[in-house]
Amino acid sequence: MVTDLDKEKLKELKLKANQARQMVIETLAQTGGTGHTAGPLGMADIFTAFYFHMLKHDPQNPDWEDRDRLILSNGHICPIRYVSMAQAGYFPVEELKTLRKINSRLQGHPHRTALPGLETTSGPLGEGLSQGIGIALAGRIDKKDYYTYVLTSDGEHEEGNIWEAAMLAGKEKLNKLIQIIDYNNIQIDGPVSDIMPLEPFRAKYESFNWYVIDVDGNDIEAVVKAVQEAQKVTDKPIILVAHNVPGKGVSFMENDYRWHGKPPTAEEAEKALQELKAEEEKLKNE
């Protein structure tokens, strides 16, 4: 079960998330013009909370049978997963420089057999929830106590197969399945609310027999409390609707859909890092 945060631990996680954002910018700036920026920055707090407080895992034993399973369905935001995994010790930090390079283990979407600690290969949107349901059902059959966490996106919910999966999870009452949706209202062509509105989103999931929790996904303490609440549910799958700021931490990227699918230039990266380093100093002095 996820434990409470004390003040010292919370500060540590905030600094870790800031460091992760800096590493995302540095990593994307050297890809040669490919990669996604806004989503990874927006999800940095959630990934930090998982890898450094909430997730039951062991970087030295990534196939540990009783580990929690973390599925990334919207695989294009993998830079933040790679950064978090490197910070946690799954592979050397220096390897981040190979992102999206030929023969790199760090492809533009996670490849399960390429890297220790990945549960699935992702790419086509909408598949991760179905994969997570299979893993959660296997855990129930095997009488295991692990949680299956599935990270999805709002734009991904334009895919029909994700709703088929949601129906099945509700039918099976998979209370060890916790979905976290990056509800940041951007996709590659514009705001999700313009392209294919999802509302009333909460009511849709509740009608499929899910327990729904709204949370500020950029508030680490709130995310931890939301997962603690989710773990108390005994008869339904749970979805955390994480209201995130895409591009979080970089003023000229925040809430701008144009940063969904492009990396920063060297000049833009330098400017972004200046802002993030200034925020780091503020956090240190709190």
Image (spheres, rainbow, N blue to C red):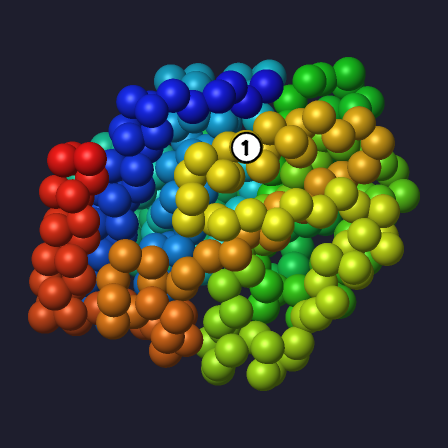
Residue at 34 percent across and 29 percent down: it is: 10
Q: 92 or 228: which is nearer to us?
A: 228
User: Percent from the top left, x then y, of residue 62?
Assistant: 46, 23
Residue at 65 percent across and 31 percent down: it is: 229
Q: 143 or 250: which is nearer to us?
A: 250
User: Percent from the top left, x then y, of residue 225?
Assistant: 54, 32
- Quarter that holds the N terminus: top right
Which residue type does callout 1 highlight?
A: Lys
194 w.r.t. 34: above or below: below
User: Is 106 left or right of 219, judged from the image as shown?
Assistant: left
28 w.r.t. 176: above or below: below
219 w.r.t. 245: above or below: above
Residue at 10 percent across and 62 percent down: it is: 270
User: Percent from the top left, x then y, of residue 269?
Assistant: 15, 63
User: Is 211 left or right of 243, judged from the image as shown?
Assistant: right
User: Is 267 left or right of 125, judged from the image as shown?
Assistant: left
Q: 149 or 11: which is nearer to us?
A: 11
* Corner quadrant of residue 285: top left
